[in-house]
Amino acid sequence: MSVLPYAVAAWLFGIGLYGIATSRNFIHLVGCLGVCQSATYVLLLGLGYRWGGIAPIFYDHPPGTPAVDPVMQALVLTDIVVGATLTALLLVLTIQAHKRGGSLDPEKLRPMRAGGTSGRGQGASRVSDREQSTS
Amino acid sequence: MSPRVRIALLALAALVLLPGAAEVIAGLPPFGSTIAQYGERINAITPEARHVANMVSAINFDLRGLDTLGEEFMLLAAITGTVVLLRGRRGEGNTGHAMRRPGRAVIPRSEAVILACRIAGPLTALFGLYVVLHATVTPGGGFQGGVILASGTLLIYLGEGYAGWRQAIHSHWLDALEGGGALLFALCGLVPMLTGAAFMQNILPLGTFRDLFSGGLMLVENLGVALAVTGGFTQLFLEFMEETRAADEAEEPGEESA
Amino acid sequence: MTAFPAALLPLPVAIPLVICAAMLATAHLLPARLPDILATLSALTVAVLCGVIAVRAADGPLVYWFGGWEPRDGLHLGIGFSVDEASGWVAAFIGLLYALTFVFAWGFFDRTHGHFHILMLLFLAAMVGFCFTRDMFNLFVWFEVMSVAAFALTAYHLAESGLAGAINFTVVNSLAGFLMLGGIGLIYAQTGTLDFEGIAAAVARGGRDPVVAGAFCLVAGALMIKGAIVPFQFWLADAHAVAPSPVSVIFSGAMVSLGLFGLAKVSAVVFGASDQVQHALPALLIGLGCFTALLGGWMALLQRHLKRMLAFSTISHAGIMLTGLGALSVDGTGGMLVYVVGHGLVKGALFMVAGILLATQASIDEIALRGLGRGIWPAGIAMALAGLLLCGLPLGLLDQGTRLIQGALAQQGHGIALVAGVIGAALTGAAVLRAAGRIFLGLGPDPGDEAGAPSEDEREKANRPLWLMLGPCCALLALDMGVPAGLIEHALPRAASAFMHRPVVDAVSEGPGWLPWASVAAALAGAGYGLLRNHLPALLVLPVRATQSAPTRALEALHSGLIGDYAAWLAVGVAMIAAVLAMA
Amino acid sequence: MTVILPLLFLFTAISGTAVVLVRDPARQVFAIAVNGLVLAILFDGLQAPDVALSELAVGSAAVPLLFLVALMAVRTQSPEEKP
């Protein structure tokens, strides 16, 4: 038990990264990124917990009662805002990429390829490569 | 790189990182054994120094208020970015009125749904306000309350339909709400400096411990955050919903957003 | 109450924030030119304020505690800003770069109700905060604000490649943020504080500790991702190449080097007392730095898309900065700081030239633009001059930084790093000079390997007069060359020692004087080869071509633009850092 | 608490894994919402009600909503994909 939270955090980051590496759909990829981020929540709150501590709100309990670490919670709150902003931005980018490129597949929406839209001086090998990926 | 090579690379990296991660985890204090000195100390002194019960709010708005300032502006950046990126394509002229997608019939809503939304909407708004106002005494605060309030406006969409939603909510007001809230927060930092205090130092009466009005300047900052988050998230929802409505006509090629 | 000079510290961050919040609140009421004026003025104000702070910080770092929460009983309760001379000057440079960029972008974005300026001002405030803070989590907050503003700005054009590039950029840099936050959580749990000094003291007490090493691994990985160090560099070419040119100026001129600036600060101040980290650093930084310098230079030489070429050259120069950092000495770090400023000025000017070409000739493709630049020859002179400065023309700030880094490397016997840096700089210079020759002189009818590189049609608004765009570009170059060398020589030992929290050294050593000339000669030779290869004897051309092709194709394939690949490389990079740390 | 917390951590790991392994975005949205809910419960178990409330509002309501809208927008764009 004493290492479980940290192991879970490491696992979440790893599986999220695996998801990003193998994702074939940008919307799915954004979800995987969220999993990577939840690893940081779990790690931080796990590190800030202590057995028997109350929530750091001294309303029902008098000040001085042993409580868990409020700093970690403040950090995670900020982190959640980061997560929401990143998700929103990435989804917007995804929607727009889909409009322009007509696809959500990373393999079909490469940033800048030889033989892309320029129509000048493309290497023959690149063109075939691109055709393979679109088919 | 083919997916198989990619996974092999990942596995290799994991193989190298595993012993390191194990060593780090073993070196950490066991789960639940102790908390850091910093948090301990804040729990000890803040109720008395700031007359607030909620330590997390005290950290967010007072002790580490600068982080929250940064966080608020991060939200502002993201929402401004969203607006720019989504509107860049639609053209700003279209945002004033409701657009209907051609080819999609307007489904009349049942009376029950409208009634439910008319009841739930104000209730959600009330709950959001409660969460905002009780920032210093119970869990919650400007951010959580703001998100709830923004979700409440979505109920207008469900109940009154898209056109009604667009009529009730104007993009300029949301900009003003969002920018104004952030401005209020930033000024909470600067105004104390005029009196000779430090940036974001509390200069207001602190109020009584466990009272709704405790924490002094924190309340104003909380309000600023609530305004900014409500405006920002509503704006976000609005722009996203607009996207599902946008007519899918082919755009003229070579159109520039800049 | 805080005394006068220190009380200035929050202002360079707060002023742009207040302006941009006010601009957003009144967005639809603002007259068309007001955002331009407001943004330029606030960037100038930031620059002046940071300059004043830097001058005042010469006697010792200025410290400011937010909310009046000064440390009690040795425990840091609030967030502090701590500005030493070097950080102040770097921030002042950033403010100035923004002001000139705003002038360059005058009227560029008038359809967007000042949204561009809002994002840019946020970006500026975050960078200044990043330079000034002395709190780990606050560092992360500014890091993220920087990232979020940058993500939105990258995709401004909404072209297909721009969007895919922006998605890659966003995903990779978000992962960087998560790594950094994980590292911060670890170090906070172990040391019980978030303040730089507090952590440093606790680390010094702790001895060898795997948690500290793990935290450093994560934080350093994050900052290296921002700093575009191999194998984290992939996002940069995608993002810089597609961002609007005023944004690229900031990306290459300030954002990337700021990642390395952060790495310098964190490794010298926060982890300065950890023997394990300090033992691992030279091998790690110099190894990665050499590799980055060479790879970036080589890739730059193979590009035909000007902005992509400049992006790779930024990678190469980031590698050179990293080798300076790896010397772990006052001269190396001082040289790196000077290099950050010099490189920012020169690279900013180059991206402005690229922007001018985009606006006036409606293309960014080196081969398509051949000879088209004759009508705007002043831009050509600026580009050639910037290219020469980039590869080491002994003149100005960039050269001074180079010589300091070379001096530090020579002193510590890192000969390989010295050579790699010279070759990297020469390659990037050769690429820029070749492009300048082709575009402005119409040389080189026969494109070589670069013809196979990716390119794309792009256009930027052509409504601005040439002088308005050329002015800031020349101002940047003049600044690079105009800062008196004596001033830097005088101030640097003191400033760099204060930056690293080390005792003041008397003087800093400089590298051999012939090295820059060798680099310039190599760059000219490289550019000449690229342009005149069909006039050269086949005996010379064939072997070069044969050795070029295969590795070139492999490298180009590595920069696939696939986010999955980038994620895999990211894991490999972190594993490499961890392995080096474990062996130290 | 000593039994519930480990279980919650395990649930978190499982629901996070589910988000990654559900490859169809339309179904992934539900996995994301469930993951947000599990995280919120875990945070409450870790005595972090503030964070739990945020995660509930953001992670299990606002973010899945954005995902849904994004999916709808993508479908609006390409009629042939409409069910």
Image (cartoon, coloured by chain):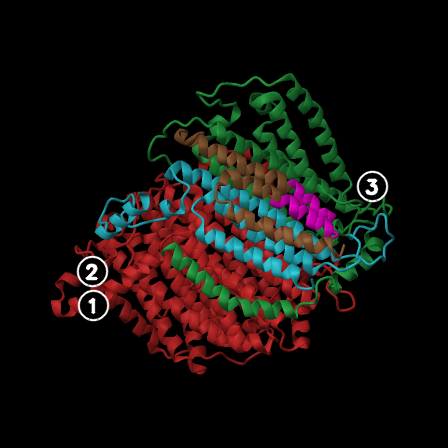
Residue B51 seen anywhere in this rendered image of the structure: yes
Q: Are discs 3 and 2 less than 8 Å apart at CB?
A: no
Tell me the CA gap for discs 1 and 3.
77 Å
Report the front residue among C114 and C553.
Answer: C553
Q: For the residues carrying marks 3 and 2, which lies nearer the camera in this image?
A: 3
Q: What residue is disc 3 on?
A: B212
Viewer-side label of 2, 1:
1
Q: Residue D50 colored magenta? A: yes
Q: Secondary structure at mark 3?
A: loop
Marks 1 and 3 on same chain:
no
* Cα distance in 3D space between marks 2 and 1: 14 Å
Instruction: Say if B47 sits above or below B144 in the image.
Output: below
Picture colour for chain D: brown
The chain assigned the colour green in the figure is B
The one nearer the camera, C298 or C331, is: C298
Q: Residues within 10 Å of mark 1 (few under 14, many from 20)?
A: few
Q: Amino acid at mark 3?
A: Leu
**Is the C terminus of chain B in the top left, top right, bottom left or bottom right quadrant?**
top left
Q: Horizontal placement of C76 versus C580: left or right?
A: right
Residue beneath label 2, please? C531
> Label for residue C544?
1
Verify whether residue D20 appears in magenta.
no
The quarter in which the N terminus of chain B is drawn is bottom left
The part of the chain drawn in magenta is: D35-57
Q: Amino acid at mark 1?
A: Val
- The picture places residue C543, in percent across and down from the top left corner, at 18, 69
Cα–Cα span, label 3 and label 2? 75 Å
Horizontal side of A135 relative to A77 (left or right) equals left
